[in-house]
Amino acid sequence: MLVRIGMGLAIALSGLLFGSAHAQNARKPTDQEVAAIRACAVKYQDNVEEGERQCVFNLVATPCTNTPEGISNLGSAECFGVESAIWDVLLNENFKTLLSELDDQQTVKLRAMQRAWITYRDTTCGFYMDKIQGSMAIPTANACGARETARRALLLQFFSRM
């Protein structure tokens, strides 16, 4: 019985992975949070590594996890989900921009690269659930998803500037 309850909870909470902004009662990013990440990404558009250091988690997720609501495992998972949602929009915008600049052969390669990256992100971040198997797996997996999505958004932005 306890195993069944634990599995049910794990399944219910797994909806938080990779962007809890899609969960039913999850908080949406504020206009200020979106603007802060967008401005930071633009500021470091020519330096992916510095953009990652300055922009990822520093502007949304970390301040959110330092609030009373964000201090719990589920609260911090939601904080990382909010940041992930912002980066996901940027990633998709950057992908479309880059796609519009490519010839047919490059387009095929970009799409293959993105499919491989999605598989990498999902298996890598999903492994936190397999390895940790506890309540800490949820915010850790969400942090992984946010970080990987941010990195990819910054990389695609960099490619479109080349």
Image: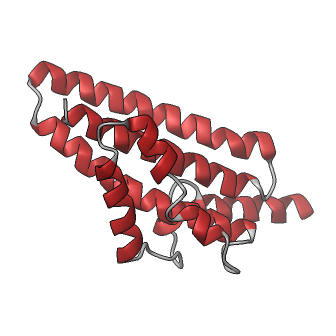
Question: Residue 49 falls in which quadrant of the image?
Answer: top left
> Does the image show residue 24?
yes
| Image vertical order of residue 73 relative to residue 158, above or below | below
The N terminus lies in quadrant: bottom right
| Colouring | secondary structure
**Of residues 138 and 63, the one drawn nearer to the viewer in this rendering:** 63
**Of residues 63 and 133, the one drawn nearer to the viewer in this rendering:** 63
In the rendered structure, the answer to whether residue 77 lies left or right of residue 86 reads right
In the rendered structure, the answer to whether residue 59 lies left or right of residue 155 reads right
Find residue 4 and report its horizontal and vertical position in percent. Answer: 83, 61
> Does the image show residue 1?
no
Question: Residue 159 falls in which quadrant of the image?
Answer: top left
Residue at figure coordinates x 36%, y 36% from the top left: 47
Q: Residue furthest right?
A: 2
Find residue 46 and report its horizontal and vertical position in percent. Answer: 29, 37
In the rendered structure, the answer to whether residue 139 lies left or right of residue 84 reads right
**Of residues 109 and 52, the one drawn nearer to the viewer in this rendering:** 52
Counting the numbered discs, the total is 0
Question: Residue 71 falls in which quadrant of the image?
Answer: bottom right
